[in-house]
Image (cartoon, rainbow, N blue to C red):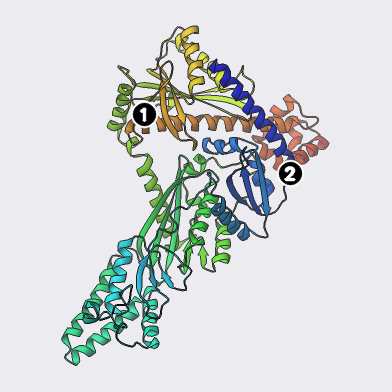
């Protein structure tokens, strides 16, 4: 009864999605060739994703054509409608996207939740100003400096300034002088009159110090120290000497030095398994003082979502640097670029997103701060360092267990114990990939003692199932796999893992036990709303196996699920690309199956056919008229 209910529910969901897609297709035809923002909505009309584009038509279309990776597939599966807003420039699109994200907090967007947690040093806008460390940014006409990488760095700088400049220390003005006055660290405005000019001079020096004038302040302190020594004011000379040493100590902690004394924010990022890490290197007065990392899931195209993070970061930041450095797109590892599975819709329809240079230009115009994507020299080395730090942070999150073979093997043993299995060495995992019912495929990966055995991976083109039916697809694949295992006497797995829930588990067990007479434990991996591994289920009826999220066993399951999904989606993309080539050539009058095969064999790819001249077709006995038709048809399709 429950299976029938699940089947009816799934059919209703598919029908609803198809109706929504039909309405969406009509709207896609009306999209303009202009920059702007788009808002994706779910069935309840809730905005679930906001994006920006150089060309709205290309970008929005890409969501509804072609294959996507698992995380993006989850987003696309929820889209039932969209809106768009045309902007006058890429800069306007960038800022509008930031404002829309802040207004709607879409669940699939990169949300900068800690944009106000950085500590700043603040000079209050009062008759008797104070220095304070704050994380709250107010529109109170105060002066803010930072952000500092942590509270300790901000407090140490404030402590030094408190010793050098006797501004008011008390929050509420007392009725009599306090200890700070007797220590020479307060002018005692509570009982004495202090001229505004005195404050102006002190604040000017503090601003100079915080904006990079360490050396100038240091030279002035040295001059005062020498004067005090000459006049035999040794206690005062000692205080000044200690202040100079404090400045030296503060600056000594800064690790990397540029030739100039500019304040810079250096950005880098890395992506892995649907997660992004953004690293910010803070350079103050030309020296790197600290770094800050943010790690979060992302669902769009990597560089575009990275720019969204940077835009949100500066939208409420009152203390802008003098220069911002962004990484080149090519600084990302090749495998990361392939792994992120951006929303491309096939050859010739690559998404038109804000790239590094145009993103930097938009930020510069908006913030009025010099923003660069350095290609060489020390500045490029800095962005490389930020990118490398981001990669390291993700390695710490995902790859620690993978590098330790002993712990990985132990994870497999522990997983077997948790499942009640006497032995667990060989795990075979399955996943399906069929976007909108096109080119359905399935894939199997093998893990032995917790490590992938890539030579034993297998791919399957689905033969008997029409449309997106994961349960029937799993029946076919399990049947084909284990019929072959029996026939060729191949190694039997100790555990079969389904990338899915109860329906796929039941289908696999039915084929194994009732058709093939095999009794192999079958478990399912269920994902949460963010398309992350949520829990393992096993048994009849299936029950969850409780594993700690930070355990080696749970991490092993994540790796298996990520790997089988990556393998399935890459095979799907490969098959779709082939079918696109076939369909594009078959659509040309005068080109049948024989000529299609001959053209591909001779030229090697669709791209080379497009670039060929009429003369290049003559060795194939193709006339000039048909050759021109082929070239024109392919080029017209590319330009659409």
Disc with the residue nearer the chain's start (2 vs 1): 1
Q: Which quadrant does the C terminus fall into?
A: top right
- Residue 456: percent from left, percent from top: 44, 23
Crowding around mark 1 (Cα neighbors within 10 Å: few <14, some 14 to 19, many 20+) is some
Which quadrant holds the N terminus? Answer: top right
Nearest the camera: 130 or 378? Answer: 130
Above/below status of 234 relative to 628: below
Front one among 588 and 471: 471
Identify the secondary structure beneath mark 1.
strand
Labelled disc at residue 640? 2
Work out whether 527 lies above or below 515: below
Q: Which residue is mark 1?
A: 451
Note whether 33 is above or below 185 in the view shown.
above
Q: Secondary structure at mark 2?
A: loop
- Residue sitting at 44 percent across and 60 percent down? 266
Residue 437 appears in the figure: no
Q: Position of residue 518 (x, y in %)?
A: 43, 9
């Amino acid at each position: 009864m429950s299976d029938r209910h699940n089947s009816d529910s799934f059919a209703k969901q598919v029908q609803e999605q198809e109706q929504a897609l039909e309405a969406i297709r009509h709207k896609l035809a009306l999209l303009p060739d202009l920059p702007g923002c788009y808002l994706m909505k779910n069935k309840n009309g809730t905005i679930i994703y906001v994006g920006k584009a150089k060309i709205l038509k290309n970008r929005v279309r890409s969501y509804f054509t072609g294959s996507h990776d698992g995380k993006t597939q989850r987003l696309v599966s929820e889209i039932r409608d969209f809106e768009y807003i045309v902007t006058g420039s890429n800069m306007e699109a960038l800022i509008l996207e930031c404002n829309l994200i802040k207004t709607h907090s879409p669940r699939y967007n990169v949300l900068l939740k800690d944009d106000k947690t950085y500590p700043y040093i603040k000079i209050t806008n009062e008759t008797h100003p104070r220095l304070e460390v704050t994380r709250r940014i107010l529109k109170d006409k105060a002066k803010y400096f930072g952000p500092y990488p942590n509270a300790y760095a901000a407090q140490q700088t404030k402590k030094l300034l408190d010793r050098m400049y006797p501004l008011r220390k008390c929050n509420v003005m007392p009725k009599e002088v306090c200890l700070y006055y007797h220590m020479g660290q307060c002018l005692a405005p509570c009982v004495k009159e202090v001229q505004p000019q005195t404050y102006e001079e002190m604040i000017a020096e503090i601003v100079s110090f915080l904006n990079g004038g360490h050396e100038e302040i240091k030279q002035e302190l040295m001059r005062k120290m020498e004067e005090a020594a000459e006049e035999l004011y040794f206690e005062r000379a000692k205080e000044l000497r200690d202040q100079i040493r404090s400045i030296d100590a503060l600056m000594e902690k800064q690790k990397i030095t540029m030739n100039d004394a500019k304040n810079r924010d250096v950005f880098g990022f890395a992506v892995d398994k649907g997660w992004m890490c953004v690293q910010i290197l803070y350079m103050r007065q030309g020296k790197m003082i600290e770094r800050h990392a943010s790690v979060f899931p992302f669902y769009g195209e990597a560089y575009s979502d990275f720019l969204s993070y940077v835009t949100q970061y500066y939208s409420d930041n009152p203390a802008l640097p003098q220069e911002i450095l962004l990484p080149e797109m090519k600084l990302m590892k090749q495998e990361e670029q392939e792994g992120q599975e951006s929303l491309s819709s096939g050859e010739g329809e690559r998404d038109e997103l804000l790239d590094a240079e145009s993103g930097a230009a938009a930020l510069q115009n908006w913030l009025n701060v010099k923003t660069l994507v350095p290609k060489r020299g020390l500045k490029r080395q800095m962005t490389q360092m930020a990118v490398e730090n981001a990669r390291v942070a993700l390695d710490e999150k995902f790859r620690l267990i993978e590098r330790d073979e002993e712990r990985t093997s132990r994870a497999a043993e522990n997983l077997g114990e948790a499942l009640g299995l006497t032995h667990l060495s060989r795990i075979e995992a399955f996943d399906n990939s069929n976007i909108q019912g096109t080119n359905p495929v399935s894939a199997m990966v093998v893990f032995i003692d917790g490590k992938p055995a890539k030579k034993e991976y297998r791919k399957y083109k689905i033969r008997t199932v029409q449309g997106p039916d994961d349960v029937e697809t799993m029946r076919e694949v399990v049947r084909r796999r284990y019929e072959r295992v029996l026939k060729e006497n191949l190694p039997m797995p100790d555990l079969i893992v389904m990338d899915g829930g109860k329906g796929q588990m039941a289908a696999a067990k039915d084929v194994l036990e009732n058709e093939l007479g095999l009794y192999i434990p079958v478990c399912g991996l269920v994902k949460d709303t963010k398309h992350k591994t949520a829990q393992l289920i096993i048994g009849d009826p299936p029950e969850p196996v409780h594993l700690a999220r930070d355990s080696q066993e749970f991490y092993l399951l994540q790796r298996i699920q990520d790997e089988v999904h990556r393998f399935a989606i890459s095979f799907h993309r490969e098959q779709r690309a082939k079918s696109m080539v076939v369909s594009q050539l078959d659509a040309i009058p005068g080109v049948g199956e024989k000529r299609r095969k001959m053209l591909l064999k001779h030229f090697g790819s669709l791209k080379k056919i497009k670039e060929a001249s009429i003369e290049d077709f003559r060795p194939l006995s193709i006339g000039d008229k048909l050759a021109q038709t082929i070239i024109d048809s392919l080029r017209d399709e590319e330009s659409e």
